[in-house]
Image (cartoon, rainbow, N blue to C red):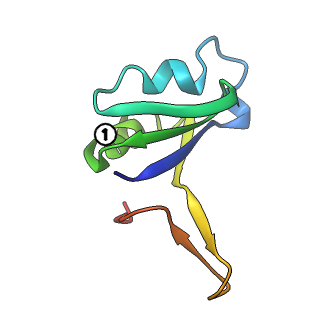
Amino acid sequence: MPIYVVATRQEAQTGSLTAEDHVRQVPGVWIKGGTDPNRITIEALEAAAAEIEHRFGSVLLIEPELISDEKAGTLEPSQSYSPR
């Protein structure tokens, strides 16, 4: 299952809800970690990630987590990911 980084947009950080609060409203999302509730790592079904972007795109940024392949010198999405 793909892993994503979700962050509250800077201009939206004055609101009362955090990135964690928003993503908890979408089924198919598991919070993996984060020390700041405005920047978290989640594991999500692709449909759930699309739903987060659709519902909260004006407030949140959602991007696939990238893993460094040091041998190849490249960055790759952590798992299969289809661009939205």
The residue at the point 58 percent across, 15 percent down is 17
Furthest residue to the top?
16
User: Residue at (72%, 32%) from the top-left corner?
Assistant: 11
| For residue 41, side relative to residue 73 (left or right) | left
Give the residue type at disc 1: Ala
Q: Number of labelled discs?
A: 1
Q: Secondary structure at mark 1?
A: helix
In the visual, does 48 lie left or right of 60?
left
Residue at (68% x, 80% y) in the render: 70
Residue extending farthest to the front is: 71
Q: Quadrant of residue 69?
A: bottom right
Asked if 17 appears above or below 42 in the picture, the reply is above
Residue 59 seen in render = no
Judging depth in this view, the residue of 38 and 67 nearest the camera is 67
Residue identified by numbered label 1: 48
What is the x, y in percent for residue 80?
Answer: 35, 65
Residue 55, compared with residue 82, is above or below; it is: above
Q: Position of residue 60 (x, y in %)?
A: 55, 37
Looking at the picture, tell me which residue is in the foreground, 9 or 5.
Answer: 5
Question: Whole-percent x and y of residue 51?
Answer: 32, 38
Name the quarter where the C terminus is drawn: bottom left
Residue 32 in the image: above or below residue 16: below
Res 62 seen here: yes
